[in-house]
C-alpha cells in the first residue's frame, strides 16, 4: 500500500553505505530522512542485543514495522540489508523509487569491523558477508530502479549521482553548488 507520497529508498548489502549516503542525499535535498535500523534501535535497543535475545524472526517483524512506518514519511529512506527478504517490504517497494548500492568483497573488508552486525558474527565474517550478499543479489536487482557501486572513489561523487537521481524522482531542484 502507498499513501501516495513516494520515497527514494536505499537498499543493498551490509556495508554498502546505505545510511551514510542516504543521509547526505536527504540533507542535500532538504527532505526527511529515515533509517530503519536506527528506528529499531530507538525502539528496542542495540540490534545485536535484540538478535541475541529474540532471534532473527522477531527482528524481521520489528523491521517490517519500521519499514512500513518509514515509507509513510516521504523523502529518503535507508533500509537494513535484510529488509528485502520480507514479502510485505518487497511489495511496498513497488510504490517507491529504489536505489541499490553495491560494494565489492575487496572493499567490504575495511568496512565491516566490530560486532555491530549479528549476522556477521561468524568465524569468517567476509565469507559470510559474501554468501549473504550473493543469496540476496537477485532480490536486490529485481527491486532496483537504479544501481550505484560504492566500492571506489570519494563518497561525495556517489552522493552527487544518487542525489541528482533522487531529486529528479522527488521533483526537487538542487543547487549543484551545495555540498553535503
Ligand atoms: C542486516 C543488516 C543490518 C541490520 C541487521 C541485519 C541484514 O543493516 O539490519 O544487522 O540482514 O543484512 P545494515 O545493512 O545497515 O548493516
Image: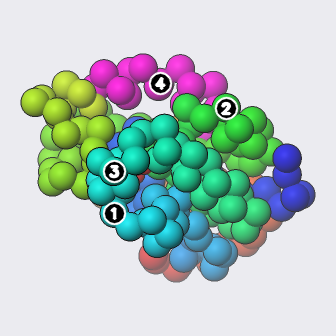
Mark 2 highlights which residue?
87
Q: Residue 172, percent across and down? A: 75, 69
The quarter of the picture where residue 125 lies is top left
Judged by depth in the image, the label closer to the viewer, 1 or 3, is: 3
Of pointers 4 and 1, the one earlier in the residue sequence? 1
Q: Residues within 10 Å of mark 2 (few under 14, many from 20)?
A: few
Estimate the spatial distance between the alpha carbons at disc 1 and disc 3, rounded to whole Å.
Answer: 11 Å
Judged by depth in the image, the label closer to the viewer, 2 or 1, is: 1
**Foreground pick, 32 / 89:** 89
| Residue 150 against residue 142 in the figure, above or below | below
Mark 1 highlights which residue?
46
Mark 4 highlights which residue?
137
Q: Residues within 10 Å of mark 3 (few under 14, many from 20)?
A: few
Estimate the spatial distance between the alpha carbons at disc 4 and disc 1, rounded to whole Å.
Answer: 26 Å
Which residue corresponds to the image point at 17% horizontal and 33% vertical from the top-left?
122
Which residue corresponds to the image point at 83% horizontal and 61% vertical from the top-left?
5
Instruction: Determine whether the beta carbon of the residue marked 3 sits less than 8 angstroms from the nearest atom of ligand 1.
Output: no
Mark linked to residue 100: none
Mark 3 highlights which residue?
53
Amino acid at each position: 500500500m502507498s499513501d501516495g507520497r513516494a520515497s527514494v529508498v536505499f537498499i543493498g548489502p551490509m556495508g554498502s553505505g546505505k545510511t551514510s549516503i542516504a543521509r547526505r542525499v536527504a540533507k542535500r535535498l532538504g527532505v526527511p530522512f529515515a533509517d530503519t535500523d536506527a528506528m529499531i534501535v530507538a525502539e528496542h535497543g542495540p540490534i545485536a542485543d535484540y538478535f541475541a535475545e529474540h532471534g532473527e524472526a522477531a527482528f524481521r517483524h520489528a523491521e517490517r514495522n519500521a519499514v512500513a512506518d518509514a515509507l509513510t514519511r516521504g523523502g529518503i529512506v535507508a533500509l537494513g540489508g535484510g529488509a528485502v527478504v520480507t514479502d510485505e517490504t518487497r511489495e511496498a517497494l513497488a510504490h517507491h523509487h529504489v536505489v541499490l548500492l553495491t560494494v565489492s568483497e575487496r572493499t567490504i573488508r575495511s568496512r565491516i569491523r566490530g560486532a555491530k552486525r549479528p549476522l556477521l558474527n561468524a568465524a569468517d565474517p567476509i565469507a559470510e558477508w559474501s554468501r549473504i550478499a550473493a543469496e540476496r543479489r537477485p532480490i536486490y536487482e529485481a527491486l532496483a530502479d537504479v544501481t550505484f557501486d560504492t566500492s571506489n572513489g570519494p563518497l561525495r561523487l556517489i552522493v552527487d549521482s544518487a542525489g541528482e537521481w533522487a531529486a529528479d524522482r522527488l521533483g526537487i531542484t538542487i543547487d549543484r553548488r551545495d555540498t553535503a
